[in-house]
Amino acid sequence: MLYTGAQIVMECLLEQGVDRVFGYPGNAALKIYDALYEYRDSIHHVLMTHEQHAAHAADGYARATGRTGVALSTSGPGATNLLTGLSASHMDSTPVVAITCNVNRPSIGKDSFQEVDIYGVSMPVTKHNYMVKDVHALADTLRSAFRIASSGRPGPVLVDILSDVAEAECEFSPLPPA
């Protein structure tokens, strides 16, 4: 069945048993937020007043529940605002998956509006990070992010999804919840 990248994100969150996402919307993340609205009966979005709050809330949720917390933000300053919370998660070994949305692929590296190399910037404060440039790699990347975040010494993993990947469609078969 054909799914958009944004719908694949939601399906993968459900596979991982995620029922709550902490975030703050922005332009590059609108497709993900549209899908989140479609899945509102299964995944509760907790609207934060700032992206840093989203990262800290995901960290606190992970500490309180023993489950992986999820933070969601848009590109540029929205993504960089997650870094303080991810740093706390990294230092305290808390499993968090941060999903950021970036500009579209042709705009990468062109200093476009709200483009930040969040992949590079987040390296010191994450256990691992990804930039997803192909919708066909999205599901496996998200599954891997959750596995890495919670295995061994837990820690935050950042998944940066390009906006055209969130819009693109591909065949997808959901797996049963992990």
Image (spheres, rainbow, N blue to C red):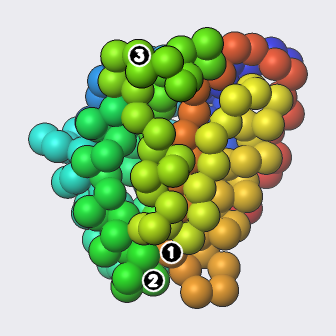
Kindly check if marks 1 and 2 are in contact, taking CB atoms under 8 A apart as contact: yes
Q: Nearer the viewer, residue 165 or 80?
A: 80
Sequence-earlier tag: 1 or 2: 2
Q: How crowded is mark 3: few (under 14 residues within 10 Å), some or many (20 or more)?
A: few
Sequence-earlier tag: 1 or 3: 3
Residue at the image point whose x is 33% and y is 24% from the top:
114
Q: What is the secondary structure assignment of the residue under circle 1? A: loop
Residue at the image point whose x is 74% and y is 26% from the top:
135
Q: What is the secondary structure assignment of the residue under circle 3? A: loop
Instruction: Report how many numbered discs are placed on residues in the image.
Output: 3
- Disc 3 target residue: 112
- Name above or below for residue 89 compared with residue 81: below
Q: Residues within 10 Å of mark 1 (few under 14, many from 20)?
A: many
Q: How crowded is mark 2: few (under 14 residues within 10 Å), some or many (20 or more)?
A: some
- For the C terminus, the image quarter is bottom right
Residue farthest to the left, as pictured: 49
Residue 166 location (% of width, % of height): 60, 22
Residue 147 location (% of width, % of height): 69, 67
Q: Taking 60 as reference, is 40 left or right?
A: right
Q: Residue 155: give its label.
A: 1
Amino acid type of the residue that numbered disc 2 sits on in the rendered structure: Ser
- Name above or below for residue 97 compared with residue 21: below
- Disc 2 target residue: 93
Residue farthest to the front, as pictured: 110
Amino acid type of the residue that numbered disc 1 sits on in the rendered structure: Gly
Residue 81 location (% of width, % of height): 25, 48
Residue 84 location (% of width, % of height): 26, 62
Q: Quarter-wise, where is residue 12 in the image?
A: top right
Residue at the image point whose x is 38% and y is 82% from the top:
91
Q: What is the secondary structure assignment of the residue under circle 2? A: loop
